[in-house]
Image: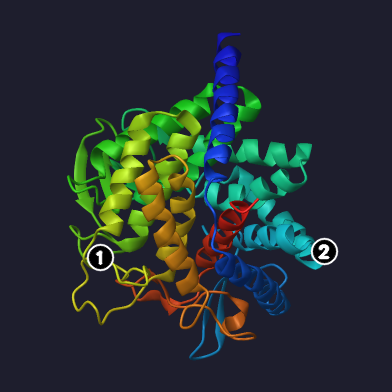
């Protein structure tokens, strides 16, 4: 009974907190011209995704498209990005009520649903909450609830109490315990699971993981390492590095965006000010960085050599925009103004060349010029499904401010 009472308190506090946020955000007046652009983007996005649907093999998920050779990259349901395609379809359906988009989302979710039992990945939040979480939000069903709860249970099996984190990558060394900053994005699924089940163990895992990550992943300037290697028996930090960035001590752009979004969610779900402070510190690092371009589309790494003649990462910008919209509702008036100004700049930049794809181009993806893993020369300067997902989410959030 104590556990259920605690969860009930959490639920109602979150409810009233969100109501307060809505009231606060309703005082912000979105730019009418940008809203018009966003409406056109939604229309264009639906057409693009119908092209993508047409070219997608029945049992595959889109990863990317290589424009120079006009070739797609596909994956199976176990790939960490598999949930973004149905999630984007559902976001677009929510805007235009095009039944063909909804039908395709449900079709591909049927292929994806077996991943609810996948204990070999930390990315079940990306995979299952972006897909089935949105499906359940739009049309709640017991089957969706079961799939999401099973997904949360599978994700929880990767938690190690000695380390205080959910394991990200497996290693050949049995004493290694690798944790990446991206993993902050998978905690939202665990909060959802506590809200609907009354089981606070999911909630406690999310808090512990976030606290450990905040303690060890972040430098004094609030930039983040990408990967930490812990001793799985003692929890001691063995190594700090940045696998997908320029160097171990550099600030990989998408990693900074994952942290910004993740700690914003942590504050939403707990109302603990330390998470709000962390999110604001991360935002300040990003937005005040001398290497952030005027159009607010970051270079793939803030410390890459050769700036300004290096690749941009539009996916990092899309994640930043979506996170900043939410964070602005929790922050001071001055911070909120800055966050929304940057968000508007990002949305305008992503809504035009060279970042927004021309109609019928880019294999049906919306956004161009993203960087997946440059050190491994994987998915470099191409469209990526998560760039589309968070761009559409950011536009959806911005549009909601006008209501």
Residue 385 percent across, percent down from the top left? 54, 67
Q: Which residue is mark 1?
A: 302
Residue 121 higher or lower than 388, as above or below? above
Q: Quadrant of residue 3?
A: top right
Name which of mark 2 and mark 1 comes first in the sequence. Answer: 2
Q: Relative to residue 103, is residue 276 drawn left or right?
A: left
Q: Front-most of 162 and 281?
A: 281
Residue 7 higher or lower than 57, as above or below? above
Residue 180 percent across, percent down from the top left? 35, 50
In the rendered image, is residue 182 in sight? Answer: no
- The residue that appears at 78% across and 45% down in the rendered structure is 139
Q: Relative to residue 306, is residue 200 drawn left or right?
A: right
Label 1: how many Cα within 10 Å (few below 14, some 14–19, many 20+): many
- The residue that appears at 18% across and 74% down in the rendered structure is 305
Q: Which residue is mark 2?
A: 99
Residue 172 percent across, percent down from the top left? 32, 51
- Point out the residue furthest to the bottom here: 69
Secondary structure of the residue carrying tag 2 is helix
Picture quarter with the N terminus: top right
- Measured in 3D between alpha carbons, the distance from the residue under mark 2 to the one under mark 1, in whole angstroms, is 41 Å
- Point out the residue furthest to the right here: 99
Q: Quadrant of residue 235?
A: top left
Residue 232 higher or lower than 224, as above or below? above
Q: Front-most of 289 and 76?
A: 289
**Residue 96: mark:** none
């Amino acid at each position: 009974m104590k556990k259920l009472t605690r969860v009930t308190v959490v639920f109602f506090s979150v409810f009233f907190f969100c109501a307060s946020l809505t009231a606060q955000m309703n005082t912000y007046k979105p730019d009418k011209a940008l809203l018009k652009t966003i409406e056109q983007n939604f229309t264009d996005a639906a057409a693009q995704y119908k092209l993508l649907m047409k070219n997608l093999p029945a049992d595959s998920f889109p990863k990317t498209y290589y424009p120079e050779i006009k070739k797609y990259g596909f994956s199976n349901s176990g790939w960490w990005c598999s949930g973004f395609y149905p999630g984007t379809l559902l976001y677009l359906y929510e805007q235009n009520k095009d039944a063909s988009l909804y039908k395709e989302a449900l079709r591909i979710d049927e292929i994806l649903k077996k991943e609810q039992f996948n204990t070999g990945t930390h990315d079940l939040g990306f995979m299952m909450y972006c897909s089935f979480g949105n499906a359940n939000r739009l049309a709640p069903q017991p089957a969706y609830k079961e799939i999401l709860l099973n997904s949360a249970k599978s994700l929880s099996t990767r938690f190690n109490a000695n380390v205080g984190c959910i394991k990200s990558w497996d290693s050949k060394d049995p004493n290694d315990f690798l944790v990446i900053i991206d993993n902050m994005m998978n905690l939202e699924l665990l909060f959802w699971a506590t809200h609907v089940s009354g089981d606070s163990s999911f909630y406690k895992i999310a808090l512990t993981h976030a606290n450990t990550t905040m303690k060890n992943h972040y430098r004094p300037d609030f930039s983040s390492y990408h990967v930490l290697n812990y001793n799985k028996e003692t929890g001691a930090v063995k190594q700090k590095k940045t696998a997908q960035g320029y160097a171990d001590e550099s600030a990989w752009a998408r990693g900074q965006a994952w942290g910004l979004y993740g700690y914003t969610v942590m504050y939403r779900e707990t109302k603990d000010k330390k998470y709000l402070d962390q999110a604001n510190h991360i935002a300040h690092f990003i937005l005040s960085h001398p290497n952030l371009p005027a159009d607010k589309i970051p270079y793939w790494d803030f410390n890459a050599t050769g700036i300004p003649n290096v690749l941009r990462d539009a996916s990092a910008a899309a994640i930043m925009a979506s996170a900043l919209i939410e964070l602005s509702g929790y922050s001071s008036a001055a911070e909120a103004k800055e966050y929304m100004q940057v968000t508007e700049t990002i949305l305008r930049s992503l809504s035009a060349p060279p970042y927004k794809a021309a109609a019928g181009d880019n294999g049906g993806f919306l956004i161009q010029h993203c960087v997946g893993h440059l050190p491994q020369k994987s998915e470099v300067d191409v469209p990526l499904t998560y760039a589309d997902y968070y761009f559409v989410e950011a536009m959806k959030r911005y549009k909601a401010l006008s209501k």
